[in-house]
Each structure stands twice: as C-alpha cells, then as structure tokens.
C-alpha cells in the first residue's frame, strides 16, 4: 500500500487542487467502485468546501 501512496503523492506534487481532483477522480480499483486515488480526490473536494 505504501507504494500506491508514493505514486499518488508524486502525481499530486506541484499541482493545483483542482488539477489533482480532475486527474484522480473516478479511478476504479479492479471490481471496486473506488480506489485510493479516487478517495483522495473525494477528500480534496470536501476540503475545498471548507476553505
């Protein structure tokens, strides 16, 4: 799981929040409807509503 976190952080590094959301939102994980990247996008959307 740690490898996924490094990959996602590398994708997000230096990008604006909206760009990261667009890049990661909707990525599935096999037969699951969501994934670690998708969950990050969802969390970022929630954070945007609070700032």
Image (tube, rainbow, N blue to C red):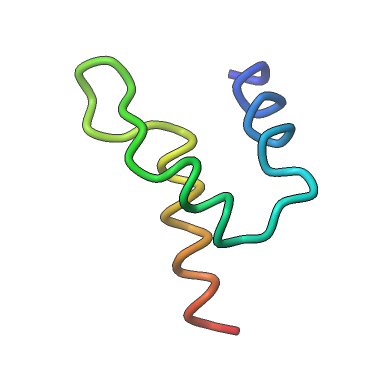
Residue 7: quarter of image: top right
In the depicted structure, whether residue 16 falls above or below residue 2: below
Percent coordinates x, y for residue 50 in the rendering? 53, 82
Residue most extreme to the right: 14
Give the residue displayed 36% in from the left and 32% down from the top.
27
Residue shown at 74% from the left, 32% from the top: 10
Give coordinates of residue 24: x percent, y percent: 47, 41
Q: Residue at x 55, y 61 (%)?
A: 18
Q: Residue furthest bottom?
A: 51
Q: In what quadrant of the picture does the C terminus appear?
A: bottom right
Q: Quadrant of the N terminus?
A: top right
Left or right, 44 with respect to 11, comes to left
Q: Nearer the viewer, residue 36 or 25?
A: 25
Residue 17: where, in percent of width, then height?
A: 62, 61
Against 12, is 3 above or below?
above
Number of dots carrying numbers = 0
Whether 40 is drawn above or below 8: the answer is below
Residue 6 vs residue 19, the one in the foreground:
19
Relative height, residue 36 to residue 43 (above, below): above
Looking at the image, residue 14 sits to the left or right of residue 2; the answer is right
Q: Residue at x 47, y 80 (%)?
A: 49
């Amino acid at each position: 799981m740690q490898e996924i976190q490094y990959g996602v952080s590398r994708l997000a590094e230096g990008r604006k929040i909206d760009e990261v959301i667009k890049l990661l939102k909707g990525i599935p994980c096999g037969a699951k409807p969501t994934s670690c990247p998708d969950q990050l996008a969802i969390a970022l959307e929630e954070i945007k509503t609070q700032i």
